[in-house]
Image (tube, rainbow, N blue to C red):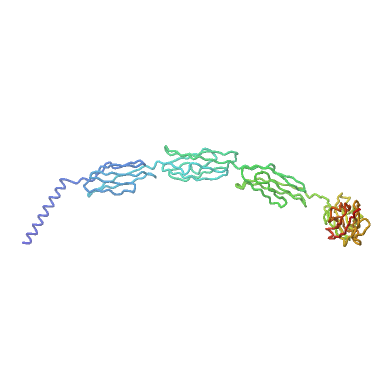
């Protein structure tokens, strides 16, 4: 019984298998197909519709991030993003349960040409500049003038170009341009190179004798300058920022001929400078004579004073000494002064061979220990009172101790100016009265006084 059941099941399975295979043979499954089989897209991208013939439940794979696929029952919508780079390609695979088909997508490169700047401004010096070029197709470059050169004049794809600019030795700014082209696109860079700085000097050679002196040289420049000299015998003189003048003093030469330089350079462009060569002759002799004690001396006591002559550039040092007031002070052949009395005199030393001389003025004011006043013949230190009448005129005289002491600064004045009038050393009695007369010397720090009584006639 069990065997019969087993065979029955086998017969039923065989019958079903034959029926199923027969149906597939009579109605075979068609493979998946897509139309079109390829897409060629511009750099702008876009939306494309693809017909898909396939069994239900087909799918797409292999999409890069710039391709999106939206599916329907019998079509696919392909979204391609804008291309901002090189040409790109991809292959999408469409498959159902039984077969697959591929879609080739090709997108052209970006249609762009951009440069990193549209202007270049350079100073006068030789230099280089970098320009970034963004382009994903072949491009060409051209410079408008031969003072601009590039390390590459063509290429394909982004690049960094080095532009070399030669030095502008002219007196004017110069202008040019650099142009880029790619297909129908173009871009241009404007280039301006500034003129070279101006620096000129009135003269570049100065000749001066051994005595030296002050030198002034004009210059012209459109920039601030720095003036220097490494010579310690050339002393620069400031002339102010608004005066375009180089001023310096050449010091006196004490040896043989010498040469130095004054340098004028631009502060902003130190490589631009001018030099003034200073050529100084050898030392020049100038015989001169002076007195170490100076040209003026005040003396307050008797005695002797030795003067010390100073000789410069003199081969003969013999001197002749003299005094213009030998009764006040005399001088001997060795320059020793002998003081006799108060007063002024000039002592002179002279050399006939070189024709030079030097003088010193003496202001002699001898100190006194005391002083007396005489009113006519009356010694007022013995009898300090004088009796007189209106109309009398009296002569006052001063006697110093010692007599040669200085007395020129003594003044006389009266307490009562109504009865007494004083003019210099003359005393006049005006009307009856009594007055004290004072005699003072500020220099000597001495003073004395006496009385005059004017009686009624």
| Placement of the N terminus among the 4 image quadrants | bottom left
Q: Nearer the viewer, residue 77 or 443?
A: 443
Q: Viewed as shown, does residue 332 lie left or right of 177? A: right
Q: What residue is drawn where x is 26% and y is 46%? A: 71
Examine the image and state in which quarter residue 12 appears: bottom left
Residue 196 position, x and y percent, is: 59, 42
Q: Nearer the viewer, residue 234 or 36?
A: 234
Total labels drawn: 0
Residue 168 position, x and y percent, is: 58, 41
Q: Nearer the viewer, residue 329 or 205?
A: 329
Q: Nearer the viewer, residue 368 or 246?
A: 368
Q: Viewed as shown, does residue 194 lie left or right of 293? A: left
Image height check: is 391 above or below 51? below
Residue situated furthest left in the rendering: 1
Residue 384 position, x and y percent, is: 89, 60
Q: Viewed as shown, does residue 423 lie left or right of 273? A: right
Residue 219 position, x and y percent, is: 67, 43
Examine the image and state in which quarter residue 442 appears: bottom right
Q: Viewed as shown, does residue 96 lie left or right of 228? A: left
Tell me if I can see residue 176 in this picture.
Answer: yes
Image height check: is 360 above or below 79? below
Q: What residue is drawn where x is 88% and y is 50%? A: 353
Tell me if I can see residue 311 in this picture.
Answer: no
């Amino acid at each position: 019984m069990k065997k019969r059941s087993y065979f029955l099941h086998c017969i039923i399975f065989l019958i079903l298998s034959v029926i199923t295979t027969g149906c597939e043979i009579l109605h075979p499954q068609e493979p998946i197909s897509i139309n079109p089989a390829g897409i060629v897209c511009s750099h702008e991208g876009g939306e494309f519709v693809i017909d898909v013939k396939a069994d239900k439940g087909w799918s797409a794979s292999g999409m890069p991030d710039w391709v999106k696929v939206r599916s329907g029952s019998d079509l696919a919508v392909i979204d391609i993003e804008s291309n901002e780079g090189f040409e790109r390609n991809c292959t999408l695979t469409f498959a159902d349960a039984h077969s697959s088909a591929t879609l080739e997508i090709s997108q052209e490169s970006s249609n762009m040409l951009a440069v990193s700047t549209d202007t270049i401004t350079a100073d006068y010096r030789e230099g280089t500049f970098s320009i970034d070029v963004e382009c994903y197709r072949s491009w060409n470059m051209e410079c408008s003038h031969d003072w601009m050169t590039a390390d590459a004049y063509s290429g394909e794809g982004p690049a960094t170009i080095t532009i070399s600019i030669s030095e502008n030795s002219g007196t004017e700014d110069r202008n040019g341009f650099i142009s880029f082209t790619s297909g129908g696109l173009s871009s241009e860079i404007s280039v301006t190179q500034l003129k070279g700085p101006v620096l000129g000097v009135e003269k570049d050679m100065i000749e001066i004798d051994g005595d030296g002196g002050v030198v002034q040289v004009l210059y012209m420049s459109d920039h601030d300058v720095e003036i220097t000299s490494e010579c310690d015998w050339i002393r620069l003189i400031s002339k102010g920022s608004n005066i375009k003048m180089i001023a310096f003093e050449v010091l006196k030469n004490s040896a043989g001929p010498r040469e130095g330089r004054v340098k004028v350079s631009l502060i902003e462009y130190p490589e631009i400078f001018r030099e003034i060569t200073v050529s100084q002759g050898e030392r020049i002799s100038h015989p001169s004579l002076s007195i170490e004690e100076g040209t003026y001396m005040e003396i307050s006591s008797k005695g002797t004073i030795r003067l010390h002559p100073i000789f410069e550039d003199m081969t003969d040092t013999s001197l002749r000494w003299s005094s213009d007031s030998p009764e006040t002070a005399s001088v001997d052949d060795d320059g020793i002064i002998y003081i006799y009395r108060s007063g002024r005199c000039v002592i002179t030393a002279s050399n006939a061979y070189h024709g030079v001389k030097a003088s010193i003025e003496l202001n002699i004011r001898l100190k006194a220990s005391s002083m007396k006043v005489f009113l006519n013949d009356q010694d007022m230190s013995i009898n300090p009172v004088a009796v007189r009448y209106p109309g009398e005129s009296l002569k006052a005289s001063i006697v110093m101790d010692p007599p040669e002491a200085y007395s020129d600064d003594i003044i006389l004045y009266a307490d009562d100016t109504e009865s007494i009038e004083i003019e210099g050393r003359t005393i006049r009695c005006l009307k009856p009265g009594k007055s004290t007369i004072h005699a003072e010397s500020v220099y000597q720090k001495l003073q004395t006084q006496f009385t005059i009584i004017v009686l009624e006639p």
